[in-house]
Amino acid sequence: MIKRFFLSIVLLLHLSVMQAQFTRADLQATGLTCALCSNAINKAVGVLPFVESVKADIKNSSFSIVFKPGVSVNPDAISKAVEDAGFFVGGLQLTSSFSGLDVSSAGVVKIGQYWFRFIKPGIRKLNGTTTLQLMDRSFLTAKEFKKIYPGAVASLKTGRADTSLEKEGIKAGERIYHISM
């Protein structure tokens, strides 16, 4: 009986983690001038361990990224890959299908192994296919970031949790991404 109880707990934990995985992304890059530029980003992002495929839209300097199932997505690795190719991220949207994923009262949710904080809290559950726009400095143009920063939470500037989030289970200094819907 106890063995069965622990097995069901492990299964539920596994399923709750699996429900909170990103499946795809839309990446907007800046600084591209030709097809070779798109190819450089395509190659750089395509070798990331959590990326299944990348499809470039040369005309719009955008990329559709499909992630491997069950693998945690690291948005900073995407940004670094684009920068290492010689370009910048102008926008990154992550999409997943959620099934009642609870958002804390502080507007914080853990997806995969990373923490995400809503710029405008108020959302309590994530349900259905949802696209989240990353609002951190490395995922927006400087002009767009300046528009949202005044009045936003302090951690938006640093990308690191402050002590006010410790009651949510996030250690001060831990990486936290900022999102909007």
Image (cartoon, helix red, strand yellow):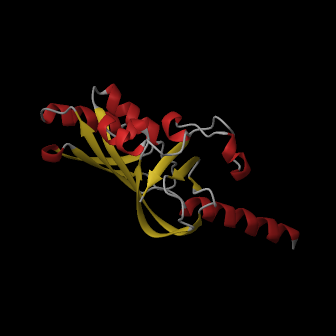
Q: Residue furthest right?
A: 2
**Numbered label tally:** 0
Which residue is located at x 34 percent, y 26 percent?
A: 84
The residue at the far front in this view is 151
Q: Could you tell whether 95 is left or right of 178 in the image? A: left
Q: Where residue 133 sits: x, y (%)?
A: 39, 52
In x, y percent, where is residue 139? 38, 40
Q: Is residue 122 above or below residue 33?
A: below
Location of residue 142 with respect to 177 vertically, above or below: above
Q: Quadrant of residue 6?
A: bottom right
Q: On the rendered image, what quadrant is the C terminus found in?
A: bottom left
Residue 28 left/right relative to 35: right
Residue 177 x/y as whole percent: 51, 45
Of the pair 4 and 113, the residue shown nearer to us: 113
Which quarter of the rendered picture does the N terminus lie within? bottom right
Give the image quarter of residue 14: bottom right
Q: Quick check: can you spot residue 142?
A: yes
* Left or right position of 150 against 56: right
Residue at (44% x, 36% y) in the render: 77
Between 146 and 77, the one lying in front of the other is 146
Q: Which residue occupies 21% across, 31% down?
A: 31
**Picture coordinates of residue 39 (x, y %)?**
21, 35
Give 18 or 159, whichever is nearer the viewer: 159
Is 120 rendered above or below residue 124? above
Q: Nearer the viewer, residue 171 or 51?
A: 171
Q: Is residue 49 visible?
A: no
Answer with left or right where residue 49 lies relative to residue 5. Answer: left
